[in-house]
Structures are given as C-alpha cells and as structure tokens.
Image (spheres, helix red, strand yellow):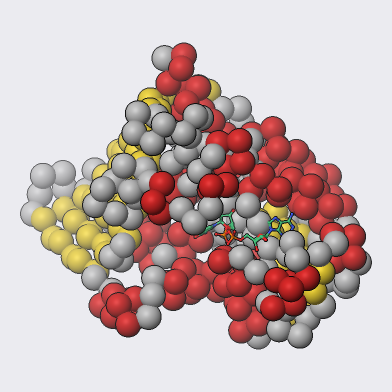
Amino acid sequence: MRIGVIGAAGKIGQMRVRTILDRPGTTLAAVMDMTMDAARAHAHGAPAFTDLAQFLATPMDAVVISTPAHVREPLCIAAFAAGLHVLSEKPLAHSVAASRRILDAAMAAKRHLGAGFNMRYYPAFAYVKDVMASGRIGEIDHIRIYGGHEGLPKFAHDWEYKAEVSGGGALWDVGIHMTDMARHLLGEIVSVYGVATEKVWKVPGSEDNAMAIFKSPSGVAAIYQATWTDWKGYKSAVEVYGSHGMVRGAYAPMENMLLTMSEPGGAVTTRKNRYPGIQIREKLKSWKTTALLSFQAELDEFVGLLEGRRDLRIADGHAALRAVEIAAAVPESSRTGQPVTLADLGPMRV
Ligand SMILES: NC(=O)c1ccc[n+]([C@@H]2O[C@H](COP(=O)([O-])OP(=O)(O)OC[C@H]3O[C@@H](n4cnc5c(N)ncnc54)[C@H](O)[C@@H]3O)[C@@H](O)[C@H]2O)c1
C-alpha cells in the first residue's frame, strides 16, 4: 500500500510518516508540506513536494492529511478526484458545510474516508467498548463523558484555537475525541441539547466550556463536557452505566474500572486496570509513545478498511462529519435554548 502524507513536517504529520515507514506492507509514496525544506527534511528518501498537483501525480493508493483543519477541504477533494483514499486528522474541517462537501466528494469518488479519532485505540477506551459489547454490565442506561485541559497555554499556534480556522473551541479540539467516543459507544447521536460558554479565554466563537446531553436513536443519553478550563490539566474519561454494573476508562493516566453485579443492587465485583507498562514508558519517554501506538493501530485498520475488512473500529466519514455537526450543534442549542435534531446520515457508501 503506497501512502502519501500532506503536512508531513508537522507535529502529528511526522508521527504519521513514522507509522507508514515502520509498518510492513506500507511504503511512504511522497510527502508534501508548505516549504521544500520542511518537506525534504521529513521525506526519508520519498519524493517531496510543495505543489499539490505534482504530489498527486506520484503513484499512490492513499493519503494521510495532517494539516490544520481549515485547509483540508481542497486537499481532500483533490485527493478523492485523483482516486485516492484519505485518512484525515480531526476535526475533518473547520465547518459543517466544508465537512459535508468532503464526505460528498468521498462518496462520489467511491473512496474511503477515515477519520483520525485515534483515541478509539487507547487501551482504556477500547476496553470500555469491549465490555459494553460483552454484555457484562447489562443493559446500557447512560454514559458520562469528559475531555478537557487548561486551555490556551496548551496551544503552540493560534490556528488551534481561533474559531475562523479551528471551527471553534473546546468542542473542536480536545472535546471532539470524546464526542466521537460518545457516538462510537452509543452507535449514533441524533439529538443534542447543551450550553456553551466563552467567559474565561474570551476568544470569539471559541467556547471554553460545552456541557451537553447527547441522545442515541433509542434514547440512551450521554452527559458530556468539553473544557478549556480544567486547571488540573489534560484528562479524558468515560463512564458507562448499565443495569448490572459500570465501566470507566480514562487517560491520562491510562486506567479502567469495571464494576459488575449479578443483579441490580447485588454483590459487587470490581476490577481495576492501571497499565503500569504504559505509565512507566510515558514517564521514561513521552505521552507521544502512546499516541504513536494508537496511530499505528489506526493505520493498520485504515489499510484493513481499504482491503475490505469489516471487523474494524476505525472512524469513518460519518463519524468525522457527525463529530463536527455536534461541535456546531451545542453552541446552536445554547443560543436557541432548544435541542438540535441531527438528520440520519444514511448508509456510508464507498
Ligand atoms: N489525533 C490527535 O491526537 C491529534 C493531536 C494533535 C493534533 N491533531 C490534529 O492534527 C492536525 C495537525 O496538527 P499538528 O499539531 O501536527 O500541526 P502542525 O502545525 O505541527 O503541523 C501542520 C503541518 O501542516 C503543514 N501545512 C499547513 N497547510 C498546508 C497545506 N495547505 N499543504 C501542505 N501542508 C500544509 C504545516 O506546514 C505543518 O507542517 C490538526 O488537524 C490537529 O487538530 C491530532
């Protein structure tokens, strides 16, 4: 599988390049970035470009697009027009309309669109999904889900938080992973009711906090918060409550708790996973080692998707679009005081 990378010199782009080079069965077909020096410095011997048409003329099967979101639409649309499959970073684009056009282009070209929701592969969150599927906590009643950090000091560039390029605030940044996680766990989200606030950082259009209730088609609810005012630091967490117990997954640190009962209110059994290997590796090296492993798992599944495998947890184009629709729906609900109903996306055609 020949894979190119656009934005190869970026923080995440460099990690994407590394996963392609390290994986048996994939080759780095070409790289592209804004300057030839930057592209060449991260090409590892592959052809390097700054021009999109020349990059796309290189023989390849797929492209990873690891640029900021606001430049993604023309890159994705050109890649689909060239017959390539695309793995895009989150958020898919900086607006719902641009995200829809990207998805439409994928479907028109009959090419796969994978979404970079790599937290699906973090062991603690994969465990939550597996426990739900196993039936061990019984019938699912509701979910609590959270993603946050301390806000503006976390960012290296202003494109990461200015709404006109980022799309918005905490919902589009740290929160979008947990928005996707809520949908990944619930199956689909069709209704959003919420409050978004901009009291602290005062970046117009970029919410510091979003609190919302998401509903699945069968009415199972997730209570959600995305925040840029968690002064304690970065954390994502999910708790799923069922008739016979609950399961929690969190990062960082990576951890799980599973509580099961033979019947509601019956004798409780608890189990904790603390992933000491991950915690030691992150202390000795960096959190980036955990992200890199998730990008490796995601690349395996992206290749699997292209090969026609169906037993995958990779986020598809619908996941990418719905996460952006929800990021726009919470502030809309906050403005109107009404829930926002999200239309059925129909089948994800390839
Ligand atoms: N999944 C995750 O864990 C995760 C974490 C951080 C960031 N991200 C996402 O990854 C993306 C990149 O973030 P980053 O932190 O690596 O940013 P970055 O600024 O470090 O890298 C972006 C790269 O894209 C290049 N670029 C910009 N516009 C381009 C264009 N038109 N054509 C070619 N190259 C272009 C830049 O020169 C730069 O090298 C963003 O969408 C971000 O939200 C994902």
Front position in the image: 302 or 33: 33
Front position in the image: 142 or 289: 289
- Please state if 67 lies on the left or on the right of 268 as rendered: right
**Looking at the image, is 226 positioned above or below residue 292?**
above
Which quadrant contains ligand 1?
bottom right
**Looking at the image, is 168 positioned above or below residue 236?**
above
**Screen quadrant of the N terminus:** bottom right
Front position in the image: 223 or 311: 223
- Residue sitting at x 30%, y 66%: 254
Please state the total of marks drawn on the protein image.
Answer: 0
In the rendered image, residue 309, in percent from the top left (x then y), is placed at: 65, 66
**Looking at the image, is 85 positioned above or below residue 335?**
below
- Please state if 81 lies on the left or on the right of 315 as rendered: right
- Residue sitting at x 46%, y 17%: 335
- Residue sitting at x 46%, y 53%: 155
- Residue sitting at x 68%, y 77%: 42
In the rendered image, residue 193, in percent from the top left (x then y), is placed at: 41, 24
Residue 181 appears in the rendering: no
Quarter of image, res 304: bottom right
In the rendered image, residue 182, in percent from the top left (x then y), is placed at: 43, 44
Residue 193 appears in the rendering: yes
In the rendered image, residue 287, in percent from the top left (x then y), is placed at: 39, 70
- Please state if 228 lies on the left or on the right of 305 as rendered: left
